[in-house]
Image (cartoon, rainbow, N blue to C red):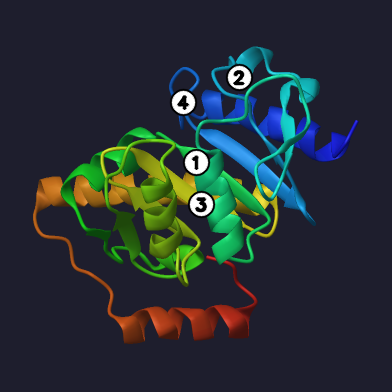
Amino acid sequence: MRLSAQRKEIGNACRRMHRDRLVVGTSGNISVRVDDLVAITPSGTDYETLAAEDVLVVGLDGTVVCGEHLPSSELPMHLAVYAATDARSIVHTHSLFATSVGTVCDELPAVHYAINALGGPVRVAPYATFGSDELAAGVAAALHERTGALMRNHGAITIGPTLAAAYDRAVKLEWLSELYWRAMLLGTPSVLSTDELSAVRDQARRKAYRP
């Protein structure tokens, strides 16, 4: 089976994503790139029953190489992100707080230094119909020099060199979004400056600390 280890890893991550309440129903999707092949979740499949063999393998042109189901409707977005970045894995969620923030903000500001894990303040990609080339292009642009983005009235996306890294960033993006939402209930949150975020990165390097 092509990319058997990656397909199994995606199945496990999908079940975790459902348990962590990062998705509802069959929403969201995950992919892993290996050279010129991409393993990606199928369209409309229950994550709790998703088996490794249900995960598809496609080429970078979207042609199905292995698998019997239809690939995720967001395949164009995954392929556009792989073309525009050095990502080797993508996690797309419909988590509650990240999705909420994406309906009212143009950017998730630096309310905590943990946002450095996403490259800085998180942009919100313009709304476009799911599965469209317009959405794919907007998300790819929002991820420029970032490892996470929000999608207007839609959800969130994170990338990484591994599925574990991309997933951890998805959890962190949801936490940051909830933090911002809760802080807004109390007043106007203070926001860290570019210099303050840079100082955190320098300190993290000195202390071998990963925020």
* Quadrant of res 82: bottom right
Pointer 1 residue? 92
Near mark 2 (Cα within 10 A), the count class, few <14, some 14-19 or many ≥20, is many
Secondary structure type for disc 2 = helix
Pointer 2 residue? 47
Kindly report the distance in space between the C-alpha atoms of the residues bearing marks 3 and 1: 7 Å
Pointer 3 residue? 158
In percent of width and height, residue 113 lies at: 39, 68
Kindly report the distance in space between the C-alpha atoms of the residues bearing marks 2 and 3: 19 Å
Near mark 3 (Cα within 10 A), the count class, few <14, some 14-19 or many ≥20, is many
Q: Amino acid at mark 2?
A: Tyr
Labels 1 and 4 touching (C-beta < 8 A): no
Near mark 4 (Cα within 10 A), the count class, few <14, some 14-19 or many ≥20, is some
Mark 1 or mark 2, which is nearer the start of the sequence? 2
Q: Residue at x 27, y 52 (%)?
A: 126
Mark 1 or mark 3, which is nearer the start of the sequence? 1
- Residue 183, above or below 66: below
Q: Residue furthest right?
A: 1
Residue toward you, 106 or 183: 106
Labels 3 and 4 touching (C-beta < 8 A): no
Pointer 4 residue? 27
* Quadrant of res 143: bottom left
In percent of width and height, residue 208 lies at: 65, 76
